[in-house]
Image (tube, coloured by chain):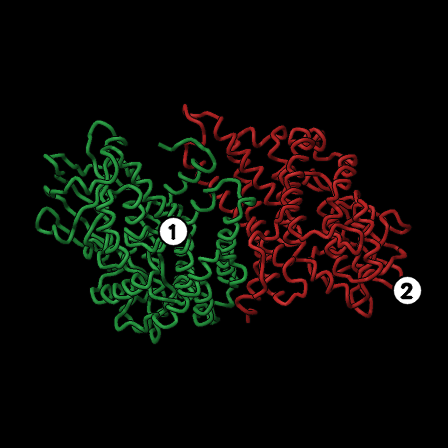
Chain colours: A red, B green
Amino acid sequence: MIEQPKNFGFGEDETMLRDSAKKFFSDHCGADKIHRQVAGNPDIHRNIECIWDKGLWQQITELGWTAACVPEAAGGIGMPLVAAVALAEEAGRAAFPSPLISTFNTTFVLRECNSAAANDVLAQIAGGKPMSLAITNQQGSWEPTDTDVSIDNGQLNGTAWFVQDARKAEGLVVSARSAAGIGLYYVAADADGVAITADGIIDLTRDQAHISFTGVTAIEVAAPGAGDTALAHALPAIQAVIAADMVGAGEWLLQTTVEYANTRVQFDRPLGFFQAVKHPLVNVMLDIDRAKSLAYSAACAIDSDPERQEWANTVKLAHMAKANASDMAVFASSRAVQFHGGIGFTWECYVHLFFKRQMHNQMLFGDARYHRAILADMLIGQAA
Amino acid sequence: MPDADRKDTPEQAEFRAYCRDWLHTNKPSQPPVRIPLGALELSDPAALQWLQVWQKSAFDAGLVGCDYPVEAGGGGRNNCQTIANQEMQRAKTPFFPNIIGLGMAAPTVLLHGQEEVKNTLLPRLFSGEDIWCQGFSEPGAGSDLANQQTFAEKRGDSWVINGHKVWTSLAHFANWMILLCRTDKTDKYNGLSYFVVPIQTAIGKGVTVRPLIKLTGETGFNEVIFEDLVVEDKYRLDAVGAGWKVAMTTLSHERGAGELVTPSAGGMSQENTKSANTSSPSALVDLAKTSYRNGKTAADDPLLRDEIIKIMIRQEAFRQNQRRALVPALIDHPMRIPLQNKLIGTEFNQDLAEIAYDIQGAASSLYLNDDNALGGGEWQLAYMNSFGVTIAAGANEVQRNILGERVLGMPKSK
C-alpha cells in the first residue's frame, strides 16, 4: 500500500489557503449579495443571462487560486489536489458564481496531457485565464470516448454539449474524434467558427451552453488516441472537486436550516425541538461528513500516487465521493426547503440558490446511480 | 495502514513491536466450542471460560489496561492501549468477554471510585476473572434514563437497595454490576447516585437474576431484582447525588467518546464452519454470487447491486471519517465524528444484514436449525440481533438527539 499522509495532505499552506478563502467569501460573497447579483429576475421566460463578478475573479487569480494546482514547471504553484478541493468546498459554501471549478477541471485534464502545448495552456490558467472543458456529447455521456466533435486536417467540426461556464471561459479544451482515436484540442472561446449557444438552466450561479465548431483551427494538446486516456486520468480529480463543491453547499444548507429551526417558533417551541425536524438534520450532517471524508480521501489518493500504482483504489474513492456527495446534495437541499416551510418555497429566501446549485452539481460528471453502477462493475464484477 | 504512516512515539513503537511479538506466539488457536459474534451474545459457560483464559493471558502480558495506573492493575503507559488494540485486531485474536467491565466500568471506577476500591476491583476486571454487567435500564427508565426508580436507602454506614433492572447483558455470568439508582425522590437528576455492587456472591441474598429470551431465541440478557441488598458505602462512586454525572462518564466511554481507550480485541473468525462473517460487505458479495433470484444470481440484479455498493460506500466513508477525526484542522466540532460512531456502526450492521436477507430470497426463511440455510443462517440471526444495539446504549433516536443538541446546537427535545 502506498503511504498516505494522515492529514490528507492538508499541510500549513493548504490550510492557510482554505482559511483565506473562507475569509474572502465571507467578506465578498454573503448569500444576500449573491442573491441580489444573480436572482434579480425570477421570470421563467427571462432572457438567458450570464452574471458574474469579473472583479472578484481578478482578485482570486491574484491570490493564486487558479495557479494553485498548476505544476511549477508550467508556471503554477504546484500544490496538492487537496488545495483545489478546499477551494471548491469554500466556493460551494458561498454558491460562488465563477468559472473556478471549470478552470480547475481543465487544469486536471491538461496536467495529464504531458505535452508542451498543454503546458502553454496551463501557464495561461496560472496567469488567471478562465477555461472550461468541451468534452460531452448531446446524450450527456460522461465517458471519455464519447464526443460529437471530429477533427480533420487540424480543424474541429461538430457540437459539444453541457459545457460549464461556457460564456465565462476564455479558452476551451475540446475532445474530438479522428480515425486515430480521441484527441484533445485547445481553442480560444472567441476563435472563428466557434458558436456558443447558451442553455436555459435552473442553477442561477452557473452558465452552461452547447458550442458548435465549424472548421475551427485548433491546437493539439493530446494526440489522437491519447485524449481519452488523459480524460480518464483526470476524472477522479474532477469528481473529487465537484463533490467538495457539494460538501460546501451542503454545509451552508445545514447551518442555515439549523439556525432557522432554532429561531422559528411554532406550538410555543422552536422547530428544532421537534425530532421530526432535528433527526433529519442530523442525518444531513452524517451524509455531509461521509461525503467530505470521501472527497478528501480521493484527492489524497491522487496526490499520493503520481505513478498510478494503486489507480483502481483512487478511482474507487472518487466514484464513492461523487456518488455519496450527489445523494447528500439532493437530501440536504430538499430538507432545507422543507424545514424553512412557506418561506423556503419562495424566491426571496436564499435557500433556492443552493438548492439549484446542488441539483446542478448532483448530475454534473455523473449522478449517484451512474457512479454506483461503475463501482458495482469494479467491486462485484460485471453483471451477466 | 503501513507502520511508517503511524508516527508512533518511541514508547508506542517499542510497545507495538512487543505486542506483535507476543501475539505471534501467544494468539490462541481455534476454540473447542462455538464462539458467538460478540461478548453480549455469550450464553455457553464453556465459551465464556475459554475467552476468560484468553483475556487473562493478554492481561498478564500487559495488553489490557495499558494506560491505567500500575496500582490499579494497569500498565502505567501513555497512549498504548490503542497500539495493543491495533495489534490484536491485526493478529485477528478472539474478543474479550468482559466487555462491559473494560469499556464502561473500568473508566468509571478509575475516575470516580475510592483508591481501595479501584485497586481491588480493577485488576480482576482487566484479567477477566471478574465479569461485569451494567444496571442502568429499568422498566420505566429506557431512553429516559434519569427516571430511575431503584432506590438506595442509607442505613447506618451501609446502603439498602431495592428495585428492578432490565436488559442486563451478562448478568447471568457477572460478579459485579455498575448500578445507577435513586437516593432522593424529590430531584430527578440530582437525586441519583452511582454504586458498584456484587451480583454472584449476593444471589439469594438480595439479588435475583432471571434470564430474558431475545426475539432470536437466544438468552444473553436478564432482569435483575434487588430486594434489600446491603452494600457498603465504600462502593459508592463519587458523591451522593452525583450519579448522573458519573453515568455520563460511563456513557461517553460506551459511545467511544471517553478519555480512556477501551481495551478491545477481535477479528478472529472460526475456521471449518459455514458461518458467514456478517459484518463484512465482501461476504455480502459472496452471498450474492451464490444466491439465486429469477433464475439469475443475485449479484446480477441491478437493484441489489446498487444496495450492495451503497453499503460499501458507507463502510469506506466510516473508515475515512475515523481518519479525518484525527486531524483537528479538518473538523469544526471535536465531538462531531466521535458521537456519530455508535449510530453509524449499528445502523451499518443492521442494513448490511437486511440486504443479506433480501439477497437470499426464499432461502432467507431458513434459520440456524436448518442445514440448508445459507451462511449457516447467521445473516438472519445478525439482522434480528442488530436491533439489540440500535436500541441499547441510548436508542439511536436518543443518539440523534445528542448529535442535534450538542453538535448542531438545537434545543433539547425534553
Q: Residues within 10 Å of mark 2 (few under 14, many from 20)?
A: few
Q: Amino acid at mark 2?
A: Asn
Label 2, label 1: how far apart the Cα atoms are: 68 Å
Q: Nearer the viewer, residue A225 or A82?
A: A82
Amino acid at dot 1:
Val
Q: According to the image, label 2 marks what residue? A: A153
Whole-percent x, y for residue B412 in the image: 39, 32
The image quadrant that residue B125 belongs to is: bottom left
Q: Position of residue A242 (x, y in %)?
A: 65, 49
B47 horizontally vs A118: left or right: left
Residue A129 or B86: which is nearer the viewer? B86
Q: Nearer the viewer, mark 2 or mark 1?
A: 1
Q: Looking at the image, is A15 positioned above or below residue A316? A: above
Q: Secondary structure at mark 1?
A: loop
Categorize mark 1 by other alpha carbons within 10 Å: few (<14), some (14-19), many (20+).
Answer: many
Q: Residue at x 45, y 42 (%)?
A: B335
Q: Residue at x 70, y 51 (%)?
A: A79
Q: In which quadrant of the rendered image does the C terminus of chain B lie?
A: top left
Name the chain letter of the residue that bears numbered label 2: A
Q: Is the Cβ of the residue at disc 2 closer than 8 Å to that at disc 1?
A: no
Q: Chain of mark 1?
A: B
Residue B103 tag number: none
Q: Which residue is mark 1?
A: B261
**Residue drawn at point x = 68 percent, y = 48 percent:** A84
Question: So how many labels did they put on this image?
Answer: 2
Quadrant assignment, res A355: top right
